[in-house]
Amino acid sequence: MAHPDDIPTHPATVGGSADSADPDRAGLPTDPAAPGSAVTTVPAEPQDDLVTTTHTLAVGRSTLSYTATTGRVVLREEVYEDDVFTGTKPKAEVFLTSYVVDPADGAPQRPVTFAFNGGPGSSSVWLHLGLLGPRRVEMGDVGDLLPPPYGLVDNPESLLAVSDLVFIDPVSTGFSRAVEGGKSKDYHGFTGDIESIAEIIRLWTSRNERWMSPKFLAGESYGTLRAAALADHLQSRYGMYLNGIMLISSVLDLGSIGLQEPDTDRAFAGFLPTYAAVAHYHGKHGRKSLSTVVRAAEEYAARDYPYALSRGARLTGSERAEHVSRLADLTGLAADWIDRADLRIEHLRFFTQLLREQGLVVGRLDSRFTGPAAAGNAEVMDADPSHDAIAGPYAAAWNHHVRADLGYQSDLHYEQISARVHPWSYADFEGRSVDVTPRLARAMRANPHLRVHVAYGWYDGATPFFAAREVLEQLDIPAAAHENIEHRCYESGHMMYVHEPSRVQQSKDLAEFVTRSSGSQPSSM
């Protein structure tokens, strides 16, 4: 099977100006020794710098032999002058890591999954070393976190058991960069991001002769929004139809969680069942079960809560008191605090307020985590204790894995989460919410075989489960097509695989989804 580093790269070409005094020296650096001359530096033509290694992984009673390829692939753009094609020029160097199981003679091509995280500005390290890849982080969990330098172990639950894997870092994340002299901001927005990720998927698929493989996308957080738009872009631009999409901690309409309009009543309702689940985890609901609490919050958020918010100043007296009391019961917050907030509970304030009397703030990404408040009277927390818990273990594990296991060397800083991508451009959505549900619906209508797996964390305070499901259930697709969407919930947060029982179950669920959606034979997992 061909690998990306088997493909010859384009030779460097340097052209001189039309009015060069010496045509034999056109395009060459000026001689610095010549009187009055200036040194002209021509950037070296970037080349793919892929490294290949071989490994094995024990999965159940079987042993997988696989090839890992990691490094940067040069993306090029076609150049036209006066509508005349004049060649290509490099525009970005995108870092990826692929794991490909050695094919058995005569066996059909395995599925391949292209995976990425979100942000915008996040590398793919979280899905790579937390859930899908053949190696994973050992960091402990709530109340039992390991000390530095943490651990890195084989992952027998890896999706590699049923699918080859390609992890992609968008430009300005990980080791991915624009080429020397290029503009990074061309990729720091919805359209540039979609087009560049689609191009790397097309390149990898073509260079590795995998057009006849079942193909999947796995995205997390903003990566779910990216995956939904990519499904439409890949099939409309390249005719590349997918078998499935895995949406992990889904957000397809930013308006549903108030990221563009923080004070919308729709967002307050979307977060409410998450608040109830978090309050239950932290002991605010006595002996009630989680399912009972969540069901009650969903019912209230679906009907009575939006009605109460819509009443505005008309909500007075006993009617207002009733809703204040109901919200206090569901969220674990004090009734007078909810009354002063006018029944509208903003999520960062909730995480700061819930355990204030204990001097603690609650995690946003994973609300099972708590940490000491920097100030007892702070309106919002100064840091997310759940992110503090995971950032170090993943940085240590990746920087070891990429060099010691995969053999890739670079002095660049691996940008786990890059601030350089901001401000992120949503120019395509000027005057309206960033919403990719029409594109996902279009992809599903055009490809009736496309299946969607959606994973939710009960304690995810970044992409609340109720808001995500409400958006998906309003997709403009035939009723029968909704049967192609499956929903799975886990007792964890945004990165639900931080919780060991959730990680094991989620790995099984994803493997079954890929197997069922691709027609593959069941794995040994």
Image: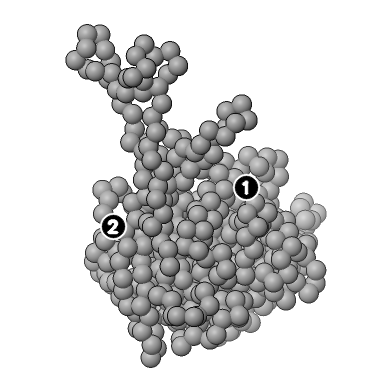
Residue at the limit of the structure toward the top, as seen here: 35
User: Horizontal placement of 477 versus 342: left or right?
Assistant: right
Q: What is the quadrant of residue 287 in the picture?
A: bottom right
| Amino acid type, callout 2 | Tyr
Judge the density around disc 2: few (<14), some (14-19), many (≥20) Cα neighbours within 10 Å: some
Point out residue 77 in the picture as x, y percentages from the top left corner.
52, 40
Query: Where is residue 406 shown, x and y percent of the image?
Result: 29, 64
* Residue designated by label 2: 408
Quarter holding the N terminus is bottom left
Residue 499 visible from this viewpoint = no
Q: Nearer the viewer, residue 164 or 117?
A: 164
Disc 1 on helix, strand or loop?
loop
Question: In percent of the image, x 57 and y 41: which residue is there?
Answer: 425
Name which residue type carries label 1. Answer: Gln
Q: Secondary structure at mark 2?
A: loop
Residue 475 sits above or below residue 146 on the image: above
Which quadrant holds residue 148?
bottom left
Let me know if residue 63 appears in the view.
Answer: yes
Q: Is residue 314 left or right of residue 109?
A: right
Count of all numbered marks drawn on residues in the image: 2
Q: Quadrant of residue 416?
A: bottom left
Where residue 501 sits: x, y (%)? 45, 82
Sequence-first tag of 1 and 2: 1
Rendered residue at 30%/47% (across/down): 412
Q: Which residue is mark 1?
A: 260
Which of discs 1 and 2 lies nearer the camera? The answer is 2
